Amino acid sequence: MRRQGIISKRVIHHILYGGRPECEQPADFKSIEVMMVQIRSRMKPRGMEIGRIVNAGYFMEGPTRLALNALMYAHRTSHSDAVQAA
């Protein structure tokens, strides 16, 4: 379920593995929790945080969303330039 910027572990699992029939939905979503811990620890030194609401899911506040969008845009732009130069 996704409401007011909160995305559940079930939705994250579906986004990552939904198109792969060999990846059945896990009973406890422990793999999603482990991934989120790793992602959150890598983002924190860059001043970006993903919040967690127990039994609801994960969310990002406005400043983190803006910073992440800027990083993704910069990555896409540099990747596009590299492809055109090749």
Image (spheres, helix red, strand yellow):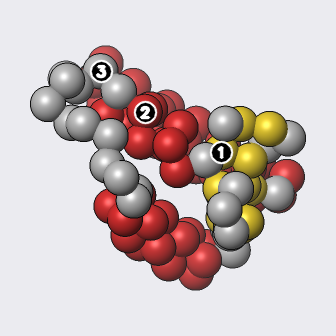
Amino acid type at circle 3 is: Gly
Along the line of sight, the residue nearer the viewer: 72 or 22: 22
Amino acid type at circle 1 is: Ile
Secondary structure under the numbered disc 3 in the rendered image = loop
| Residue depicted at x 22% and y 25% | 20
Secondary structure under the numbered disc 2 in the rendered image = helix
**Crowd rating for badge 3 (residues with CA inside 10 Å; few <14, some 14–19, many 20+):** few
Tell which residue pokes out farthest to the left in this image.
22
Label 3 and label 1: CA atoms lie apart by 18 Å
Vertical position of residue 30 compared to residue 70: above or below: below
Task: Assess whether mark 2 and mark 3 are in contact (beta carbons under 8 angstroms).
Answer: no
| Residue depicted at x 37% and y 65% | 30
Q: Is residue 29 visible?
A: yes
Q: Which residue is mark 3?
A: 19
The quadrant of the picture occupied by the C terminus is top left
Q: Which residue is mark 1?
A: 7
Along the line of sight, the residue nearer the viewer: 31 or 40: 31
The quadrant of the picture occupied by the N terminus is top right
Residue 56 locus on image (x, y percent)? 70, 56
Along the line of sight, the residue nearer the viewer: 62 or 81: 62
Label 3 and label 2: CA atoms lie apart by 8 Å
Instruction: Give the mark nearer the N terminus: 3 vs 2.
Output: 2
Amino acid type at circle 2 is: His
Residue 15 locus on image (x, y percent)? 44, 32
Residue 78 locus on image (x, y percent)? 43, 37
Q: Is residue 42 visible?
A: no
| Residue depicted at x 74% and y 47% | 6
Task: Assess whether mark 1 and mark 2 are in contact (beta carbons under 8 angstroms).
Answer: no
| Residue depicted at x 32% and y 49% | 26
